[in-house]
Amino acid sequence: MYPKPIQNLITEFSKLPGIGPRTAARFAFSLLRKPENDLRLLSEAIIKLKTETRICKNCFNISEEDLCEFCSDAKRDRSLVCIVEEAINIPAIENTKRFNGLYHVLGGVIKPSDGVSPADLKIKELIERIKSNGIEEIIIATNPNTEGETTALYLVRTLKSFNIKITRLARGMSTGSDLEYADEMTISSALAGRREYK
Amino acid sequence: MYPKPIQNLITEFSKLPGIGPRTAARFAFSLLRKPENDLRLLSEAIIKLKTETRICKNCFNISEEDLCEFCSDAKRDRSLVCIVEEAINIPAIENTKRFNGLYHVLGGVIKPSDGVSPADLKIKELIERIKSNGIEEIIIATNPNTEGETTALYLVRTLKSFNIKITRLARGMSTGSDLEYADEMTISSALAGRREYK
């Protein structure tokens, strides 16, 4: 339907998450209206994404160096480790400015339907870190959905033999949310985790 | 917050229409998980988008050759020309399989607030086509919004001195829509354009 160079780009854009052919076409036509230099910047940024990044040797975050910005920062608390599914989850924690520990990126969640088993995640490496590093507390911050919970439970079972505190992000009502629209699971969690006024 | 190569790509993706930094980050991280060759395909498709396309000399559609697939197709009806705002609008008309004429891409709409005046659109070139080409009917298919209507009215006024039929796509209820949710303008148009059962 479109000339081949446009169709090719639509095909590639359609591979991005949540992007169908219509949105991909909108992207392609918006790029057509831009100066060639803008296209070059985007094109180069895509190539450099993998050639100029690597995986942090300690926590498996994405990094420009062997150790990521957190693992190489002497001011971070090495006794506290927050476990996340993916590197993309880290800024959400950092933005709170309430966490000063290190991270451990699992690289996914246990999901048998997709063939992802515990052996595919960086769990062995987490155990190595616990064995050698003086970690006192692990905060499990996998997502609050079925796979995230399954993975959290697996971690709790696997790590309970070590003499460390294992915690999980609290479940409850989101700030600004409304009881009327909250789902039952969320309200149940909020009831179970209720806090006393002191 | 993210390593520079990721941040750069997020910045570039955020320039796409309707894409905020969160979606851009999701795109960047989805690309990180892909083989390097996939990134190369996307990167090359972006560069080729402009280097391997040009503008059709006759109708200003995007093309790989001097004349686009429609203008170079001897089977199309040269007496009928459909006027669209942008090349991206053409597939919507083609998909109906009810139009066998040529197109004319205006390259935008009259929008004084953005500094777009009739002189910025391919209207002079449309008049040249009408003068030289044996066109019998012009179908105006600008979008049914304020700018599209303004542009359509301007075209009607400008072209009325030529001995050609000028038509506009019908306005009315969309197929599958619901009276209850339709806006007043749409229902008004549907009333005004009502058709008699025969």
Image (cartoon, coloured by chain):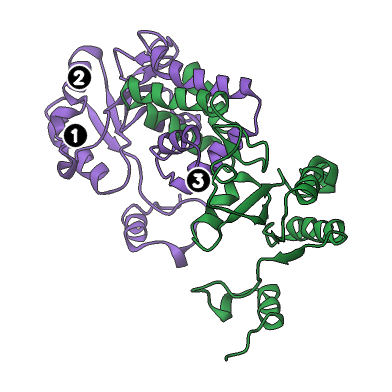
Chain colours: A green, B purple
Amino acid type at circle 1 is: Leu
- Dot 2 falls on a residue whose secondary structure is helix
Q: Residues within 10 Å of mark 2 (few under 14, many from 20)?
A: some
Q: What is the crowding at mark 3: few (fewer than 14 residues within 10 Å), some, or many (at least 20)? A: some
Q: Amino acid at mark 2?
A: Glu
Residue A65 occupies quadrant: top right
| Residue B125 on image: x %, y % | 20, 19
The one nearer the camera, B195 or B118, is: B118
Q: Chain of mark 3?
A: B
| Residue B159 position by quadrant | top left
Question: Between disc 1 and disc 2, whose residue precedes?
Answer: 2
Which residue in the protein does label 3 denote? Answer: B23
Q: Element under label 3?
A: helix
Residue at left 46%, top 35%? B4
Please name the residue shown 65% across and 79% down the image: A190
Q: Position of residue A150 (x, y in %)?
A: 80, 58
Viewer-side residue, A54 vs A5: A54
